[in-house]
Image: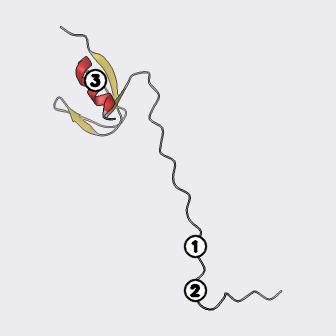
Amino acid sequence: MADKVDLIANRSMTYMTRQLVAEDPFEAKPREAKILVAIGKARLVGAAAPAAKPKAPTPKPKAPRGKPAAKPKA
């Protein structure tokens, strides 16, 4: 029999009738493990957690068109 590969789920998913949530450890056959890692569903045990995508900076609100904003009096 082929050896098993230790993996950690990156997100919720079903694998071999098991409901997994993110960070659940599980075992898979080497061929299946390679596919799960390639499509981003799991990572190898000991591998770093996937980096969070950086948020895009929030754009500054634009002044409404028409009359210019009144300047505050000092």
Specify which label sits upstream in the sequence, 3 or 2: 3
Do residues under tags 1 and 3 come within 8 Å of each other at their CB atoms? no
Q: Position of residue 55 (x, y in %)?
A: 51, 52
Label 3 or label 2, whichever lies nearer to me, is 2
Q: Which mark is residue 33?
A: 3
Q: Tell me the kind of residue under disc 1.
A: Pro
Q: How far apart are marks 3 and 2 (CA)?
A: 56 Å
Crowdedness of circle 2 by 10 Å Cα count: few (<14), some, many (20+)?
few
Q: Tell me the kind of residue under disc 3.
A: Ala
Colour pattern of the rendering:
secondary structure
- Which residue is painted at 74% across and 87% down in the image? 71
Q: Residue 30 carries which label?
A: none
Label 2 or label 1, whichever lies nearer to me, is 2
Q: Residue furthest right?
A: 74
> Which residue bears the numbered disc 2?
65
Q: Would residue 49 be found to the left or right of residue 3 on screen?
A: right
